[in-house]
Image (cartoon, grey):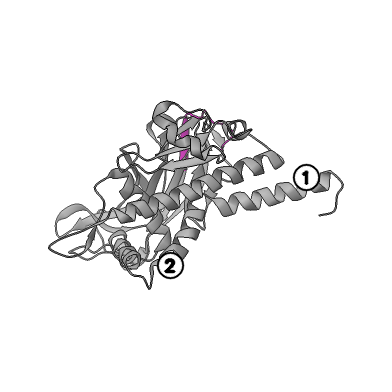
Amino acid sequence: MKALFPYRTLVGDVTLTVEHIRIDDKVAEHTVQLDERTIDLRDLEETDWEVAVITLIAKAPPSEIADRSETKCVAQVECGPANNRVSVLLAEDPSIRGLWKGYLELERGYWYASAELRVHITGTVEGVADRIIGSSEMWSIQFNDLTNRPVNGAIKITWVDFGDPDDDKAFLRKHQDNYAYLSIDPDEPQLFLNRGFAGLEQLLADRRRRGLEKALHDQTRTSIADKTWSALFNAALAAVDINDDSETPEWPAVDWQRRVLESLLARMYPEKDPEEALVEAWASYRSSDTSAALQEQLGPAANAHVRAPRLLREGIRSFANGQDEAGEDR
């Protein structure tokens, strides 16, 4: 749903297209997922890359732009986990009204976990310059963490031998047959991975794998991430408060809880703005008639957020290719 402004805005859609991406001056293949509006930089071979250059094309209805004065197109990237934002002006095509092109440069050290990208069309309205008159749909940019973590996202991950933990983690001893344990502390959730689970640390430590090894690595990583995001979502939704005056749900005050909700609600209710999505999810969560349906929506959303479908398809192809090379029947 489009945001409402107390002045006339564009009726038609503003579109944003990612033309291509260069990583340290090399074209990065297979990083743009058009159907999910995602730029995925998590599985690059260049794990120590320095600069990503994203080339953008934005379009607005030319008939609506024609009678506007001083229209501009601004591309903006916001990253909550890194508390960082960058904006650049795109250049309008001199021969095509309502078409802008340009690029963003993102230096690796300033970005973390995930960011949001969109373009805004601005113009002079009622004598006030640079008012937003239209915006594109949001794109997601997914980064590797700055450290080599097996699950992406702003969550602390710690390797512990569950069979021989320190005294302050003695509770993990009763889970020594499991490979992971999620502690959902309201202040800081933490994911523990079992160093004592034979082969797990070696499997997840190196992301630069090929073939069947990569398939096993990806499926293990996404399985952990999928379960983690689902659990964090339910914990965050339980932390939602009701405004005493308006009797509507309010975003949790804890930063990680709000980020988790915003990330998954956008996938669960793509046709709604964030506040509407929160209201609907909260109502479903509190109702015995609809709480099960909420969990049904959460499953595919968490699945898509950690890219499980794409990685599974790649794994199946690797498995089929591996069998072909071995001369076996598929």
Chief secondary structure of the magenta span? Answer: loop
288 vs 185: above or below: below
Depth check, mark 2 against mark 1: the one in front is 2
Percent coordinates x, y for residue 264 in the rendering = 40, 55
- The residue at 61%/30% (across/down) is 202
Give the residue at mark 2. 292
The circle drawn on residue 17 is none
Say left or right for 146 vs 210: left
The single residue placed furthest to the left in the displayed view is 245
Give the residue at mark 1. 322
Disc 2 marks a residue whose amino acid type is Ala
Say left or right for 235 vs 313: left
Say left or right for 242 vs 321: left
> Can the viewer see residue 249?
yes
Disc 1 marks a residue whose amino acid type is Gly
Magenta stretch bounds: 44-54
Q: Quote the CA–CA distance across marks 2 and 1.
A: 40 Å
167 vs 308: above or below: above
Q: Around disc 2, counting alpha carbons within 10 Å, would you say few (fewer than 14), some (14 to 19), or many (20 or more)?
A: few
